[in-house]
Amino acid sequence: MITCSGKRPLSVVRALVRLAAAMAFLFAAWPAGAAASQAVAQGRAAAQEQAQTQTKPAAEGHHPGGHPGEAMPRGGACEQEGGELHTFEDTQRWVEMFERPERAATQKPDEVVAALHLQPGQTVADLGAGSGYFTFRLARAVGPDGRVLAVDIEPGMLDAIRKRGLDEKGGEGVSTILADQDNPNLPDGQVDLVLVVDTFHHLHNRVAYLRGLARDLSRDGRVAIVDFKKEELPIGPPLEHKLARETVIGEFEEAGYTLAREESFLPYQYFLIFKK
């Protein structure tokens, strides 16, 4: 209310003073309150992300590698270089991940097997067999008179391969071997080719491992390594867990092998074939 003289009543003045004080308080408190609200929101988002990560498998875990930053499912563990643990208790989830159809676009499994030039009746070891992604392709390549030894340190994966072999073409020629961390437990002098796909970077004491592996090879035995290039890629393990092509060649040479051939058709992996 305004008087004719232009002066405000005292009650109105007091009300305006109180309103101004309240508004000043609110404006002063607003940045801190907003920051606190933002912090709470960020905390909730981080907690949700952590909960999702704890149960989400890597896009390509143990043998095929995994997307950087993705965690492994909980369960039994396999330690790789750098201290990272890959776990495989939830076998079915890993089998589904390894066998997903879109993997073939970059892994090119049929082309890899063809490039090995396997002969009927040969004995082949699939070292780090996982779900058997390559195992049964190898079995078909060596035919009914050949043998494929599916080697892994994870009993659950070997169980999955044995079950799959009951229905898979070539399954009758597949045997499973439970390996140790430092020994594939292959038969001495009988293996014509050892295929190691996305697994070599997991091994410790690789030169010693390769020297032991040489005793398992036949006279003309070979070892084929397929692993991720040491560069930033859309798939595969973190950069620090990868091995450079030159490192792999150097370790094989130190163990007494010679690089016999190299294939270059894989977009994200090197493909090296060694002879002893």
Image (spheres, rainbow, N blue to C red):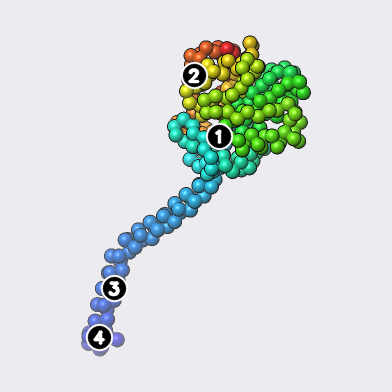
Q: What kind of residue is marked 3?
A: Ala
Kindly state the secondary structure of the residue where label 3 is placed. Answer: helix
Task: Name the mark on residue 22.
Answer: 3
Distance between the alpha carbons at the discs numbered 1 and 3: 61 Å
Of residues 77 and 247, the one drawn nearer to the viewer in this rendering:
77
Residues packed near mark 2 inside 10 Å, few (<14), some (14 to 19) or many (20 plus): some
Which residue corresponds to the image point at 57% horizontal and 32% vertical from the top-left? 153
Distance between the alpha carbons at the discs numbered 3 and 4: 17 Å
Which residue corresponds to the image point at 54% horizontal and 18% vertical from the top-left? 212
Q: Nearer the viewer, mark 4 or mark 2?
A: 2
Task: Name the mark on residue 207.
Answer: 2
The quadrant where residue 222 appears = top right
**Proximity of marks 1 and 3: CB atoms separated by less than 8 Å:** no
Where residue 241 appears, as percent x and y from the top left, is 47, 30
Where residue 109 appears, as percent x and y from the top left, is 66, 28
Task: Name the mark on residue 11.
Answer: 4
**Proximity of marks 4 and 2: CB atoms separated by less than 8 Å:** no
Q: What kind of residue is marked 2?
A: Val
Between disc 1 and disc 3, whose residue precedes? 3
Kindly state the secondary structure of the residue where label 2 is placed. Answer: helix
Q: Is residue 208 left or right of residue 196?
A: left
Where residue 43 appears, as percent x and y from the top left, is 41, 55
Task: Name the mark on residue 62.
Answer: 1
